[in-house]
Image (cartoon, rainbow, N blue to C red):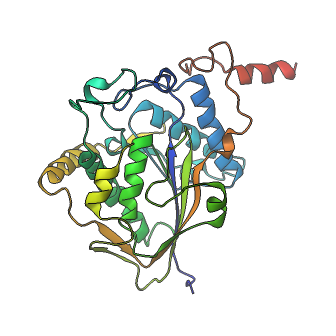
Amino acid sequence: MVGAEAREVRLYLIRHGETVDNVAGNYAGRRDSELTNHGYQQATRLGHHFQAQGVVFTHHFCSDLQRAATTAAQIRQAQVTSPNALNAATEAPAVVQTPLLVEKDFGVYEGTRCRAIDHPLGVETKESMSCRADAFLDRHLLPLFLDTVESRQHVIAVVSHGIMLSVLWKRLLLRLPPNSIRIDPDVLANVHGYSLEYIGPWANTGYLELHCQQLSTVDASVSVQPTTSVAPMAAIVSKVTTGVDRKSDKRDGVLLRDAMSACSSDPLRPPKVLQGWSFVVKAVNGKDHLKSLKRTRGGVGSARHDPSQKSLESFFKKQKVR
């Protein structure tokens, strides 16, 4: 039985909204592709969805590429403007941007049409992405599970990119004790061919929701040891295929350099494993917020979003009240 002082963590791994390069079918890893008007609406819808569900984030993290930062900012904005927000300053903490969460670097293929890569010149390796994921998890995420001062419950949004999210999820699985994670029956009923290691692609603003609960206030800890809850680390690595309120943590640039250095010398070091926790996957590629959302015609929806222009939606709303 979980004690009265047990901690809880709710984690949302979220992909950014649709971008100009998504529409064009171009490789865009480190390339700073902008959201389309449709992508901006997707992000806005997601923020409103979380607000309607009563989700109050205590932490926001995102890649420092603008497509992820803008998506994260919209999620936070919905929380700030929520009628239930008693104190926006405390209920909507600033978004922490980090280069550890950026997308895979496609090297010379950046900005070109997506196709098979025969000669991966300058393309980031799977090991490099795994090291970045490890650095983010060990520095930013795992400490929140051990936090006994700030709050008994953390609700965390992590906005990143399709391939990077898949790597991040696999590296997170390595930190969970054997038999500590299960999939909600509703997820299994709606997702075919699902497995913990390979959850399929993330749609734009699609999200994975993970509920974590401390089983014992005495046994909860972090230990450094291999885990058999998923495939061995080497196998996991080899199979990976596929505004104003923001703040940047400059130290992550140093952490990124150190992580890359450590990766090159010891890429398969044992991960830190959470002990004394249980985990439930509550949503995979969640996109209920996209129901009924249609792309604006005439090429407007696929065009680059310009924040200085009023949206068509707000324009028509004003027309109705006249």
- Tell me the residue at 59%/36% (across/down): 43
Q: Nearer the viewer, residue 65 or 239?
A: 239
Residue at coordinates 30% horizontally, 68% vertically from top-left? Answer: 272
Q: Where in the figure is residue 257, as x and y percent of width and height? A: 19, 45
Assign the N terminus to one quadrant of the image: bottom right
Quarter of the figure with residue 293: top right
- Residue 84 location in percent, x, y? 70, 52
Above or below, 40 relative to 158: above
In the image: residue 210, left or right of residue 122: right
Q: Residue at x 26, y 30 (%)?
A: 118
Q: Is residue 99 above or below residue 25?
A: below
Q: Is residue 144 above or below residue 72?
A: below
Residue farthest top in this picture: 298
Can residue 161 be seen from the camera position used here?
Answer: no
Q: Which residue is at the front of the view, 56 or 103?
A: 103
Eyeballing the image, is 77 above or below 149? above
Image quadrant containing the C terminus:
top right
| Residue 248 location, quadrant | top left
Q: Residue 52's x, y, as percent?
A: 71, 49
Instruction: List x then y, in percent, for residue 274.
Output: 38, 72
